[in-house]
């Protein structure tokens, strides 16, 4: 019984108050979204192989894909595979069309359009992954790194990118005028107990 | 199959100083010499300089003063993109009352591509939007300027001695001739030959200029010779053991774009002013007529004179290729487009076996014997629905289709080599050309204005058909 209840609980997304998540976005699995986060329509957040926990103040634009998927050589049915949680910090920006499978993302990062992050990458804070850059190495990207160019060249910048507070405020006002917004769901502790 | 339409599949041979094979879209046609010209057999002249981002025009003298760089625009030292000026609000104390603070605008440069900002190098934000940014000064600038002055003076002196010798030798001859000759000798370290070539008819003023400068140059500029040092700075001790932090090290390209400083660390990469681009005009070397002359305005892409080959010579393009097999005859469909408004007559011929132009051939071809007739290009034809049907008797074995000024025709290809390289064929194309630029002399009989005379031009065309079918 508890197993069935747990599965039911995992299917709902927990959206904190103050977050704007459009109905047209696709959210599957156990996803927690923090306050002041904006999820545009057609964004996809898919938690297959474990939960995804998204912090506050993030901006996830259209056609962005944040996916916690199984590694390629492991089938979903094998036992002994623990679900790993994917954590995303605060004030990150996921621009249009990016794909992120990184398990741990810090704060104040910008992942530009059509960038591709592999599963074994860990982003610290203040990183900017340029447009169309792919990072599929197994490494921790140091703070304030900028990855740019067709060869994914890297350089370090002196300061972290500015948080997009103005943009977030604007979107939180305007998006509900044109899109339906998913209802905020408080923590699912109550559901489990039932 | 769009790869068949690539321009470098069909090349035309240009018989200039060198034999050049280039697609028709990259060639020019001198209608006074009635010959094809490529970029290598024309002389290039600079028309004007302009900045590619702010499109500001600059006369050549001013460009030379500013070392061919724009005054307002900057290049990112990291990715060579154009830098844009961004503004932030910072609280700054009001000058009258130190306790209150007002928001003042501070400007910094930022690159949109690699996110480089001027703050990364330690450049302070400026309070002016433009004009506040200074390039760092070259530490060797003084020495270099002194060296340049010294060598300019030396070159002047050498030229004067040369002139004096020639004047002593040929006193009877016109003084015009020899000073023209000295102009053509390249003056070292001085003005470029272009500026000198523009004054061929003023030799007396040239001499006058020299004599004036004699008075000025009396003061000798002496330079100290460079001293060679025996000892070189030793390398730091941890040079081999210190781990390299790659994001800190500049790439060769970033380093060499600033030859004055060549910084090794990314924190010393300062932005540089943007390089100017130039508009150039082309001139045929034989008849000195202009082949291409763009408009002066940098925002305009039109040309005052545009004698490009595609508007005079019929263009051959490949339409479809069947599977090519070794020593088997296959039919290739080509199209021929007529660019002029008159009816064009084109006849094709194969290259002879001993033709020196046809060394790249790897297949034999059979071209149609008949003369192909192409209708003139009618710009209004696409809007005119009641167009008269063109009444050309076409042999269906030769002509596949006909559409306004375009015709599709077959040639037969027999590949001769079994190697892996592309099958290349060549043929000669002979067409009539009416020179509308030449003045029409009134005919002796009088009467109607005669049409321009048609001359026949022959071009050597090579096609690259692709590999043999496996």
Image: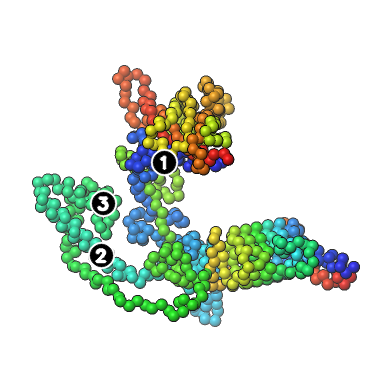
Q: Which residue is mark 3?
A: B196
Percent of width and height locating residue B334:
52, 33
Q: Nearer the viewer, mark 3 or mark 1?
A: 1
Q: Which residue is mark 2?
A: B149
In the image, farthest residue toward the bottom: B99
Colour scheme used in the picture? rainbow
For mark 1, give the secondary structure.
strand
Residue occupying the point 12% across, 45% down: B173
Quarter-wise, where is residue B232 in the image?
Answer: bottom left
Q: CA distance from mark 3 to mark 1?
A: 34 Å
Residue B404 can be seen in this image: no
Instruction: Identify whether A46 is placed above or below B105.
Output: above
Q: Is residue A75 left or right of residue B425?
A: right
Q: Is residue B304 left or right of residue B445?
A: right
Contact, CB < 8 Å: mark 3 with mark 1?
no
Q: Chain of mark 2?
A: B
């Amino acid at each position: 019984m508890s197993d069935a209840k747990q599965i039911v609980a995992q299917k709902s997304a927990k959206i904190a108050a103050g977050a704007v998540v459009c109905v047209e976005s696709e959210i599957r699995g156990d996803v927690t979204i923090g306050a002041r986060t904006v999820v545009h329509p057609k964004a996809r957040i898919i938690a297959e192989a474990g939960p995804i926990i998204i912090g506050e103040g993030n901006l996830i634009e259209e056609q962005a894909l944040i996916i916690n998927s199984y590694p390629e050589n492991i089938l979903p049915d094998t036992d002994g595979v623990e679900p790993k949680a994917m954590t995303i910090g605060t004030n990150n920006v996921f621009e249009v069309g990016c794909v992120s499978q990184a398990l741990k993302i810090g704060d104040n990062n910008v992942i530009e359009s059509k960038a591709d992050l592999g599963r074994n990458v860990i982003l610290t804070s203040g990183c900017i992954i340029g447009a169309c850059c792919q990072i599929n190495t197994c490494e921790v990207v140091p703070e304030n790194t900028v990855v740019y160019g067709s060869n994914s060249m890297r350089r370090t910048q002196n300061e972290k990118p500015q948080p997009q507070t103005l943009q977030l405020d604007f979107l939180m006002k305007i998006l509900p005028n044109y899109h339906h917004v998913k209802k905020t769901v408080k923590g699912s502790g109550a559901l489990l107990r039932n | 199959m769009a790869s068949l339409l690539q321009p470098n599949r069909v090349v035309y041979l240009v018989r200039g100083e060198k034999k050049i094979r280039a697609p028709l879209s990259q060639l020019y046609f001198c209608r006074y010499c009635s010959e094809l010209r490529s970029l290598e057999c024309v002389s290039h002249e600079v028309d004007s300089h302009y900045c590619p981002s702010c499109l500001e025009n600059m006369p050549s003298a001013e460009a030379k003063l500013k070392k061919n760089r724009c005054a307002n625009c900057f290049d990112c030292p990291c990715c060579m993109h154009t830098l844009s000026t961004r503004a932030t609000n910072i609280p700054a104390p009001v000058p009258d009352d130190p306790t209150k603070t007002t928001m003042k605008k501070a400007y910094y440069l930022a690159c949109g591509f690699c996110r480089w900002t001027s703050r990364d190098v330690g450049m302070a934000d400026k309070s002016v939007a433009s004009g506040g940014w200074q390039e760092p000064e070259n530490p060797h600038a003084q020495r270099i300027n002194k060296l340049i002055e010294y060598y300019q003076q030396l070159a002047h002196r050498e030229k004067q001695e040369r002139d004096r010798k020639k004047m002593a030798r040929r006193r009877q001859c016109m003084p015009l001739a020899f000073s023209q000759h000295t102009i053509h000798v390249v003056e070292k370290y001085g003005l470029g030959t272009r500026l000198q070539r523009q004054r061929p008819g003023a030799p007396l003023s040239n001499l006058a200029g020299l004599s004036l400068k004699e008075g000025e140059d009396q003061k000798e500029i002496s330079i100290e010779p460079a001293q060679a040092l025996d000892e070189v700075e030793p390398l730091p001790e941890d040079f081999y053991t210190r781990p390299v932090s790659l994001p800190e090290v500049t790439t060769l390209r970033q380093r060499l774009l600033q030859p004055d400083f060549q910084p090794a660390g990314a924190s010393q990469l300062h932005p540089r002013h943007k390089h100017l681009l130039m508009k150039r005009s082309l001139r045929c070397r034989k008849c000195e007529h202009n082949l291409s002359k763009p408009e002066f305005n940098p925002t305009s892409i039109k040309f005052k004179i545009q004698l490009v080959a595609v508007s005079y010579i019929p263009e051959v393009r490949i339409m479809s290729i069947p599977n090519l097999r070794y020593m088997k005859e296959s039919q290739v469909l080509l199209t021929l487009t007529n660019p002029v408004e008159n009816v064009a007559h084109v006849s094709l011929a194969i290259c002879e076996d001993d033709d020196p132009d046809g060394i790249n051939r790897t297949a034999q071809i059979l071209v149609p014997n008949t003369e192909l007739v192409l209708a003139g290009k009618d710009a209004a034809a696409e809007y005119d629905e009641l167009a008269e049907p063109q009444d050309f008797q076409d042999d269906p074995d030769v002509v596949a289709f006909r559409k306004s000024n375009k015709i599709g025709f077959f040639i037969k290809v027999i590949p001769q080599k079994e190697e892996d390289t592309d099958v290349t064929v060549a043929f000669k194309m002979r067409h009539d050309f009416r020179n509308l630029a030449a003045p029409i002399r009134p005919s002796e009989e009088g009467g109607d204005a005669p049409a321009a005379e048609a001359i026949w031009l022959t071009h050597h065309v090579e096609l690259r058909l692709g590999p043999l079918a496996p």
